[in-house]
Amino acid sequence: MIFNIGEIPIYIKSGSTDMRKQINGLTIQVQEVMDLDPFSEALFMFCNKKRKLLKIIYWERNGFWLFLKRLEKDKFPWPGSKKEVEKITRKELEMLLGGIDFFGKHKPLNYTKVS
């Protein structure tokens, strides 16, 4: 790999994706479901229903990369279908691949006065 992942936006498609899809099918998902440009310099991530299979596509100058990871045990933490697209950071990607579920993190509270 020649690109610096620290500088590339990372988008995940919430919910499950049919993992029979290859590059063409996944780029259609990026364009039509996620409403993003598959030819932009970004990583686009997809997960299957059982959350054991993860695919990532990335456009580099003249062609697509397709990355695949299959877990033999455990499951990937993955958001349901509350949003079609979520943008995550490199650190969150590392946590996701490490099995840490940051999607259920505490939500910020905004109080207007002390009670």
Image (cartoon, rainbow, N blue to C red):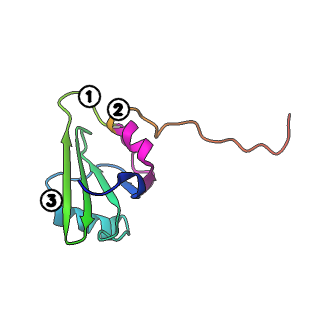
At horizontal 17% and vertical 30% (from top left) the residue drawn is 72
**Camera-nearest label, 1 or 2:** 2
Kindly check if marks 1 and 2 are in contact, taking CB atoms under 8 A apart as contact.
Answer: yes
- According to the picture, the residue beneath numbered tag 2 turns out to be 99
- According to the picture, the residue beneath numbered tag 3 turns out to be 22
At horizontal 28% and vertical 51% (from top left) the residue drawn is 46
Give the quadrant of residue 63: bottom left
- Disc 1 marks a residue whose amino acid type is Asp
Residue 76 is one of the magenta-drawn residues? no
- Residue 1 in sight from this viewpoint: yes
Circle 2 residues within 10 Å: few <14, some 14–19, many ≥20: some
Q: Position of residue 93 (x, y in %)?
A: 38, 44
Q: Position of residue 103 (x, y in %)?
A: 46, 40
- Residue 13 in sight from this viewpoint: no
Residue 20 shown left or right of residue 114 in the figure: left
Find the magenta span and give its range.
77-96
- Looking at the rendered structure, the secondary structure element under dot 1 is loop
Nearest the viewer among 18 and 7 is: 7
Of labels 1 and 2, earlier in sequence is: 1
- According to the picture, the residue beneath numbered tag 1 turns out to be 74
Q: Position of residue 1 (x, y in %)?
A: 23, 53
- Image quadrant occupied by the C terminus: top right
- Looking at the rendered structure, the secondary structure element under dot 3 is loop
Q: Position of residue 14 (x, y in %)?
A: 37, 51
Q: CA distance from mark 1 to mark 2?
A: 8 Å
